Image (cartoon, rainbow, N blue to C red):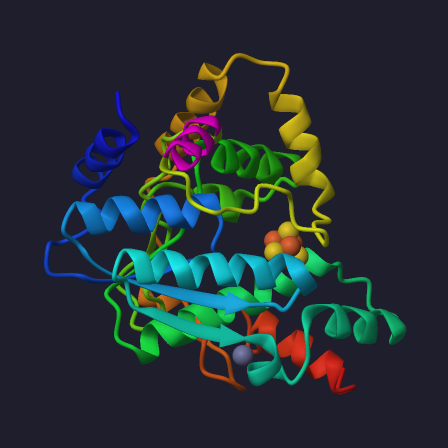
């Protein structure tokens, strides 16, 4: 089955979009978000690329150039946000500063928390109905195992193509139309399309559990990844509601605690924790 057909089936089965939805695709210029943008645009959806540049040297520079060219080629609007404008510094500087103050955060934790924070903030600001992320089946199988390794049942319960929280004005609903597409299918597709693409991993990637989960899964046939994500989805009937989501007392973004993770990090950067 083509990956386009798989995306269509996932959208239909999980009711990911309405035809009139204004959709933001969190895009990096990499293979997954480019594939999501291309297929959704081809299927007639109203898509915009939303990129948050953590400013990781040549790696994100090249990705951003590729993304700009891609959006121009397919006539897709592009919204660009970057760490320097938002936080006054690149990711590496924020990490070094935090480490010099004795905090043990690694690059991926800082990058992930701050990028998620900005993507949600700007998706709300521009009034998007849905926020697409390019997670593929390999990412999701790895994430499922990571949640099991960490005994993180809360995250485990939120897994699925339609991410955990709905009915909240504080979150733009996140959806994952590539949920059932293997990474190798995406690589094959993007190579066939001959899009300029950085296939090398991010030089700052530090999530040890993810690397372990990836290595572990290499021991099994592909079908096992699909079984893992389907198992996770079957255990995911509960969806949090507005009442259980707090607003951060500093920035107003959604948070499990009084102060959200992004503000906690930024307070640490400023020396306030
Ligand atoms: S691998 Fe880590 S540091 Fe690199 S872009 Fe992804 S989350 Fe950010
Ligand atoms: Zn906050």
147 over 188 or under it: above or below: below
Q: Give the side of residue 84 with respect to residue 129, left or right.
A: right
The one nearer the camera, 132 or 13, is 132
Asked if one can make out residue 134 in the rendered structure from this viewpoint, the answer is: no
Q: Give the side of residue 55 with respect to residue 122, left or right.
A: right
Magenta region: 184-192
Q: Residue at x 36, y 44 (%)?
A: 35
Tell me the chief SS of the magenta region: helix
Q: Residue at x 19, y 46 (%)?
A: 42
- Direction left: furthest residue: 19
Asked if one can make out residue 97 in the rendered structure from this viewpoint, the answer is: yes
Q: Is residue 265 magenta?
A: no
The quadrant of the rendered image in which ligand 1 is seen is bottom right
185 over 89 or under it: above or below: above
Q: Quadrant of residue 145?
A: top right
Q: Quadrant of residue 142?
A: top right
Q: Quadrant of the C terminus?
A: bottom right
Q: Residue at x 38, y 72 (%)?
A: 79
The x, y position of residue 248, in whole percent, is: 50, 79
Number of residue marks = 0
The x, y position of residue 68, in whole percent, is: 42, 64
The x, y position of residue 11, in whole percent, is: 21, 41
The one nearer the camera, 262 or 92, is 92
177 over 127 or under it: above or below: above
Q: Is residue 186 magenta?
A: yes
């Amino acid at each position: 089955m083509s990956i386009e057909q798989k995306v269509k089936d996932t959208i239909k089965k999980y009711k990911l979009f309405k035809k009139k939805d204004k959709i933001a695709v969190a895009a990096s210029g990499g293979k997954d978000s480019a594939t999501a943008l291309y297929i959704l645009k081809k299927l007639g959806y109203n898509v915009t690329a939303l990129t948050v540049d953590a400013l990781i040297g040549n790696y994100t520079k090249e990705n951003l150039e590729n993304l700009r060219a891609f959006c121009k080629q397919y006539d897709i609007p592009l919204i660009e946000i970057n760490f320097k404008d938002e936080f006054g510094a690149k990711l590496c500087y924020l990490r070094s500063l935090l480490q010099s103050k004795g905090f043990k955060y690694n690059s991926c934790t800082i990058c992930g928390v701050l990028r998620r924070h900005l993507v949600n903030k700007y998706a709300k600001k521009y009034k998007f109905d849905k926020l697409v992320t390019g997670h593929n089946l390999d990412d999701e199988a790895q994430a499922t195992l990571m949640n099991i390794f960490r005994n993180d049942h809360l995250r485990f319960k939120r897994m699925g193509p339609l991410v955990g929280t709905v009915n909240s004005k504080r979150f733009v609903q996140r959806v994952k139309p590539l949920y059932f597409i293997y990474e190798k299918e995406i690589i094959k597709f993007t190579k066939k399309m001959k899009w300029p693409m950085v296939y090398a991993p991010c030089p700052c990637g530090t999530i040890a559990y993810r690397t372990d989960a990836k290595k572990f899964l290499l021991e099994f046939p592909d079908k096992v990844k699909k079984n893992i994500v389907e198992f996770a989805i079957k255990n995911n009937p509960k969806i949090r509601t507005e009442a259980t989501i707090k607003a951060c007392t500093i920035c107003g973004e959604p948070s499990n605690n009084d102060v959200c993770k992004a503000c906690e990090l930024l307070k640490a950067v400023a020396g306030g924790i």
